[in-house]
Each structure stands twice: as C-alpha cells, then as structure tokens.
Amino acid sequence: MFNLFSEQDENKFTWESIGDVIDGRRNLGENMPVFVYRLFQFTIKDELAKRYGNEATVDIFRKAGELAGKEFANHLLDLSLPFNEFVAHLQSVLEESKIGILRVEKFDPDTGEAVLTVGEDLDCSGLPITGETVCNYDEGFLAGVLKVYTQKEYVVTEVDCWATGSRVCRFEASVKSQESEQNG
Ligand SMILES: [Zn+2]
C-alpha cells in the first residue's frame, strides 16, 4: 500500500528505522558512493513529479528533509551548546557525515535570520546547470535542525545552487512570525 496523501499525520520514520548498519554490513561497511544516493533520490523525485506534479514533489522533499533534519538533530547533535559552539559542532557533524561543508555567512541574533552556505553539497554539487535550485530536501533539513535547536518555526529557502551556476548552495533562513499564536 502506498498512500502518500493519506490523512495520517504521524511519522512512521524514527531514527531506529535506519537499523544497525554496522552489524548488517560487516563486510561492505557504512559508506557508499554518492551516485547511489543521487540515483535513489533523483529517480524517486522523477516518479513523484510524474504522478503528483513538480509543486507537490518539492513540498514532499521539503517535508521529508525537515523530518530528517529533526531526527538528525535529536540523535546526532548536542542541543545544549550555545549558538556559536553549536554551529561549529553542526559544521563538523555535517562534514563527518559527508553531507556538505556548512558556513554561516550572516546571522542576526535579534531576528534569528541567517544566511547559510553549503559547499560540496551531497544533493547537487557537480549537477548539470539547469537554472533551477534543486536542494529542497536540504531546505527542509536545515529548517528541521534549526527548529529543533531554537524551538522556532524556521523557513529555509535556497537562493543559489550548483544547478543555478553557483559553486555553493546558499540558503536564507528566517523565523516565521506567529506572534498571535505565541502567548508564552
Ligand atoms: Zn543546491
């Protein structure tokens, strides 16, 4: 059964869904080539776009990325660190995980707005240039990490991408204003 748009809102995915890779792949190990990841991701994207259209596909990738970012933050990051140390820690975990090389270009402590770049991005570095930003999964992923760390409703938008001709992906992150909903 594959019912993508079912009413069910609960996530079935948990960190445990990944399983015990070390035990399961005693000879092959934990790593695999980037092309395998991209083959998987881009063929799924293609099939989703055919069935549901581009807009829905982008939304699915963002939501899936956000779930991944939240689980990643909750399981691999030390959320008790102060901001600057947290950023350095996030940079090293992203690099160790071979997701990409994170830099914070700008951060406004008053508004929480940030501009982040990711170099050698797992999703897009080296792709043919199409003029479109393609890292919707990363947009969600970064938003998920920021949401878990700050407890604020972050929205992350990619403004530059390898696929638009940039050497790094650049993401603008801002906090969704929801003052009316927040009463302490
Ligand atoms: Zn990109």
Image (cartoon, helix red, strand yellow):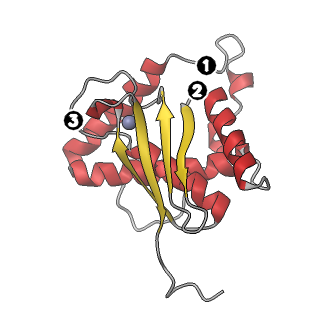
Foreground: 23 or 147?
Answer: 147
Q: CA distance from mark 1 to mark 2?
A: 10 Å
Dot 3: element: loop
Cβ atoms under marks 1 and 2 closer than 8 Å: yes
Residue type highlighted by circle 2: Lys
Dot 1: element: loop
Residue 31 badge: 1
Q: Position of residue 103 (x, y in %)?
A: 56, 38
Q: Earlier in the sequence, mark 2 or mark 3?
A: 2
Residue located beneath label 2 in the image? 98
Q: Earlier in the sequence, mark 1 or mark 2?
A: 1
Residue type highlighted by circle 1: Asn
Residue located beneath label 3 in the image? 131
Q: Position of residue 82 (x, y in %)?
A: 76, 55
Q: CA distance from mark 2 to mark 3?
A: 25 Å
Quadrant where the image shows the C terminus: bottom right
Q: Position of residue 94 (x, y in %)?
A: 62, 34
